[in-house]
Amino acid sequence: MKQLKVLVLLTGLICISFASFGQVKALDKLEVLYDQGHYKMVLRKANRLLDQPDYDYSYKPEFYKSLALFQLADQGLWAEFHPKALQEARELFSVVIASPEGIKVFNTHLNHVSQLKRDLVKKALAYKAEGKQAKFDEIQQILFGLFDRIPDLDVPGEINAPVVDAPEIRETAATSQEREAIVKYAKKQLGVPYKWSGVDVDGFDCSGFTSYVMKEFKVSLSRRAEDQYNSSTKVKQKNAQKGDLVFFNNGSGISHVGIVISAKGEPLTMIHASSSKGVIVTNIEDSEYWLKRLYAIGTYVKGE
């Protein structure tokens, strides 16, 4: 009788082991197919796994489904029949990185996330070259909102090239007062959360924040960071002052904007709408991430 119990126990353990192996194999298959560029197959298999409660313990199906959707979102007829693919990809990706278990999957497969970031930058550059402004803007917001802290891979595109030949603006008592007022008003927004396309105190994105602050001083800014850069008066980095705007480039164009709150000659510091923490203050020169992407300083404060 004792031998029979042992046999039953061993049989049970073997069955559990095979079941676990089958689950791991099915999940690993997603990674292999994604590596091979079979994004539609990844999507189909991920959907099947998500319908099976046995796989609820892992965020791998959600993770690879989101990556596949990002890749498929601009592919011909498939994209035409799935116009909400990017939205679904963003939502799934956000679910993964919001969970402790999802973060484990994310960190284990960070190489795929970095490669996806590179591919998205290339897509943005292509849209820009084709004049597809809305598509370009959407990818830029995704890159900043979800991929801003992902390690970069080498991508073709614009390089960090701060303006060096801008004339110095003569300051007056009035402009100095305006600069102080801009910073004071901007700091009143500290702690406001980040919100995709947000333009008010319910939540800001980066350019929504700068346009909201500058509107208080009768300066009407475009909603796009790139347009804010294009229409600004350029300033040498060494001459940056409170109330100027500071622009960043992720390789595909202007991807972020903040407001300078440091005085001329002080370490360059900005207040901005961060995708992870909302409106915060950041010392650019102490941050390898921001310093690497620093592109230019522009101003809307009119001196003499």
Image (spheres, grey):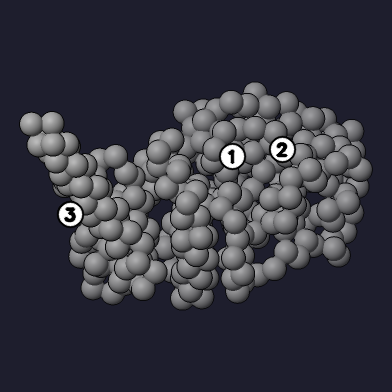
Where is residue 63? Give x, y as percent.
Answer: 36, 51
Q: Which residue matches tag 3?
A: 48
Q: Is residue 79 visible?
A: no
Badge 1: residue crowd in 10 Å (few <14, some 14–19, many ≥20): many
Circle on res. 274: 1
Residue drawn at x 24%, y 67% as measured from the top left: 41
First of labels 3, 1 by sequence position: 3
Q: Which residue matches tag 2?
A: 282
Circle on res. 68: none
Residue drawn at x 57%, y 43% as measured from the top left: 206
In the image, taking residue 153 as reference, residue 196 lies left or right, namely left
Q: Is residue 32 visible?
A: yes
Tag 1, which secondary structure?
strand
> In the image, is residue 40 above or below residue 234?
below
Badge 3: residue crowd in 10 Å (few <14, some 14–19, many ≥20): few
Residue at the far top in the pictured view: 188
Query: Which residue type does callout 2 highlight?
Result: Thr
First of labels 2, 1 by sequence position: 1
